[in-house]
Amino acid sequence: MISSRVSSSARACARTSPIRQMQRRSLATVSSSLFPGEPSAPHLVTRAIPGPRSKELSDRIGTFQENRAHGFVVDYGKSQGNWIADADGNVLLDMFAQIASIAIGYNNPDLIALAKTDEFITATMNRAALGSFPPTNWQELVETGLGTVKPKGLNHIFTAMCGSCANENAFKASFMAYRARERGEQAQFTPEEMQSCMKNQSPGSPDLSILSFTSAFHGRLFGSLSATRSKAIHKLDIPSFNWPVVAWPDVKYPFSQNARENAEAEKVALAAVEEAIVSSKKGGSTYGPVAALIVEPIQSEGGDNHASPAFFQGLRDVTKKHGVFMIVDEVQTGVGATGAFWAHDKWNLTSPPDFVTFSKKMQAAGFYHNIDTRPSMPYRNYNTWMGDPTRTLQARQIIRTIQDHGLVQKTDDVGNYIHSQLAEMITNGAGKGKIETLRGENAGTFIAFDGKTAEVRDKLIMEMRKQGVHMGGCGDKAVRLRPMLVFEKKHADLFLEKLEKALGQL
Amino acid sequence: MISSRVSSSARACARTSPIRQMQRRSLATVSSSLFPGEPSAPHLVTRAIPGPRSKELSDRIGTFQENRAHGFVVDYGKSQGNWIADADGNVLLDMFAQIASIAIGYNNPDLIALAKTDEFITATMNRAALGSFPPTNWQELVETGLGTVKPKGLNHIFTAMCGSCANENAFKASFMAYRARERGEQAQFTPEEMQSCMKNQSPGSPDLSILSFTSAFHGRLFGSLSATRSKAIHKLDIPSFNWPVVAWPDVKYPFSQNARENAEAEKVALAAVEEAIVSSKKGGSTYGPVAALIVEPIQSEGGDNHASPAFFQGLRDVTKKHGVFMIVDEVQTGVGATGAFWAHDKWNLTSPPDFVTFSKKMQAAGFYHNIDTRPSMPYRNYNTWMGDPTRTLQARQIIRTIQDHGLVQKTDDVGNYIHSQLAEMITNGAGKGKIETLRGENAGTFIAFDGKTAEVRDKLIMEMRKQGVHMGGCGDKAVRLRPMLVFEKKHADLFLEKLEKALGQL
């Protein structure tokens, strides 16, 4: 199953702009060169998916582990490029990509080749406690990998384990930097702080808060879950911090056709943000002073909700004005899918956010920041592993493959194509009266639309599976497209053809 | 650097007890068979460690990432078995093992061979969203790996990312199960619960708590940090849940020579635990009802603090009596280092704990539990990755290598030898008046002792480095031994020889 062929360009060191331009001209050949054996059509062998073998394996897993969220059981060895193979031998076009976390295709030859290198094997099987005993290649590895895609204006990196953990460590860094600023640069911790924190009480454990938006999703551990507002089922029965929430702007789609109303809605939300911050600092709120605001460039799990660059500029302005850190959660939007490497690149902010968090498609997790939010002392934001060298190496290769093949630009182009075709299908085609509210104008393949009802959405996803296309939902009734960055026009055409058929079956 | 030789026993499937007995007889040969090129003495080339090359690399890392907690920079490719090589070419006997997280030696040939298998490469480079799209081999992989070391009485497994995340997910499972019991089996969530949780307010976000002990360490994310009480520096400036703490029994060492006083001290702690639980349930406390108690078998980061099996049986009894879940945090104690696979195996509890959490030496993380603490619905304790297939495969091989070579029994034997030698050294030898308070009787190589002062401890660790032995501290003034499971009598003798010399230098 596993090929060790490496595209020669993946090994190239020079990444000059003429080369990149040349690569752009050969876009059409990317997936056929990386995945010469990629199927051209779904291969369906069971009447329903999950088929009997998937069900049997899932049931067996169920004897020792939660299995009720299983979609189907996957044969990863047989999956290739954009195509996912299941335990029964079905092969589907994958537009969900392990919940938006596979960047450059299954069994990408560049990654398979990486796995066979001594550097990779040594790093994986001798896992370093990176914060204390980093490997000799760590500086070079980070600088030639994660370091090459530092968001504009951010020069430091904190490596972590997953999206929740990335966000929580950014929260911790925010709280420490916020208190350091209050305390003054030379000030020491007071005995009262040292003692009270051991009892989880203020002033050592201060009553500070993180501001987030309705329908936001920032993770599921105790801090990140307190900032998550997408669905009750994530939050029920779990103790939470009393942190504030502000309503996401009530915008209308197509976004650009409702520019005036949307600007108004965003103004309302910005005013609410400022009010929440100001009242917290005056002691006029039930929650403590807001130390940081966290926001997704496009709210993903919460239903693919958009806002304009002006809104995010407004958030940057209001947080700066009131000394609140701004955390941009790019766990799902990052690494190219929106047609920019970072979704927030498209905002052209006048000053950078304080933190940009990442995970999923990067495989590695963590956040970018600046020296001003590095804690005052070592061991304050620390743990045994501080990330994973395996995933750091993988991230570097993913970034290189993306750059070598111009996959961000390609995703932008393919996304624009899909968006325009879907707009037509919804207005005048097979989608009319069945699907609506298209999102993702100028957002690469990060596209979504709603079913007329949740039931229609659920049926459509199941019908698409029967057509050989694997998709995911989000929010209450949305279908979200989350293909990989190697999803090309030919895949888009196949998707559109199958969608038309599936809509006809509803 | 990397050898693909695999010990033939590592491939053996039969693990019958006669075979294991035979393996025990050949203990002395384990490290020489696994690591034929292992050094017999330290190799020191720089006057101090970190040497100039380590410092230079660390400084470069410091330009983009926290480097103030660096010990030295490591050449993992050149490290072998119990020996760690640094960037300058120094080779030290490693008794810290990446903060107690390397189980079977650097560049263990069994792991290197695993890394080269198609199964491993496929799993690593096509990372599954395990909760929804598990791989076809998942059931077999877990059942033949993590499943073979299920603690007695626990039949279910939750896979996670790291120790903090394992503990936090166990907290979440506790809270959900606690509320499910209160609610009654058939009851649905009320509209009030559904709405209030979206505002982080009760009853949907209930005011429940986790009880932990003074000097406990359970992690550094927001929930786990609220249960951590080891050092102020971990907790300062971070908002915490108002969760209760009870004083760890004030025991004396050597433990068995102070049996009567220690039993009294444990009684005091048990009474305080019961009082904290009872008052929380009556509404007579500032914190909410205690849903779970979390405890380490040996408090590790907090200073290697011990208690007796009777104490832990008492905790099991009092938690059972009051409907509180018991979480045993085996993140540092698990996987053989205490001379049992799980440290709590030695307690012979009359009924099992509700959760046993693991990470570190297992490389994989998560917890064992039973079906009664599986949430009522899917997606409640869930995330994108739900662990890491790479580390699950690695865990299986680590478990197999441990079993094939009888490494748990060997660690028990070597630990007893070290403990008796240290006792003698402290009472009548080079340690007299310099080190004291030896812990770890009958606890494998999980041994610690205090420096007379924190300064003596710090000097001793630096002096040991000059002697070619790499060690770690914990608590205020303790040295903790955390060698790997391939640490044998010959390594112990070398350590004791170097310790004697180092003490002579103080």
Image (spheres, coloured by chain):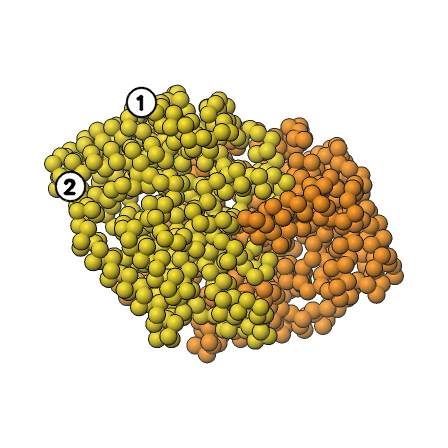
Chain colours: A yellow, B orange
Q: Residue furthest top?
A: A36
Residue A366 in the image, given as x and y percentages of width and height: 48, 49
Q: Residue at x 49, y 27 (%)?
A: A12
Image height of B343 relative to A43, above or below: below
Query: Crowding near pointer 1: few (<14 within 10 Å), some, many (20+)?
Result: few
Query: Which quadrant of the rendered structure holds the N terminus of chain B?
Result: top right
Callout 2: chain: A
Q: Position of residue A361 (x, y in %)?
A: 42, 40
Residue type at mark 2 is: Lys
SS for dot 2: loop
- The residue beneath circle 1 is A40
Residue on which disc 2 sits? A434
Residue B300 pos. (x, y %) = 64, 58
Q: Is residue A224 left or right of residue B196?
A: right
- For the point 86% across and 57% down, the residue is B504
Residue B160 appearing in the image: no
Q: Residue at x 35, y 23 (%)?
A: A26
Splitting the image into 4 quarters, where does residue A48 fall? top left
Chain name for mark 1: A
Report whether B488 appears left or right of B98: right
Q: Residues within 10 Å of mark 2 (few under 14, many from 20)?
A: some
Which of pointers 1 and 2 lies earlier in the amino acid sequence? 1
Q: Are marks 1 and 2 in contact (CB under 8 Å)?
A: no
Q: Does residue A434 sit above or below B368 in this rendering?
A: above
Visible residue check, residue B263: yes
The foreground one among A257 and A388 is A257
The residue nearer to you, when weighing B145 against B172, is B172
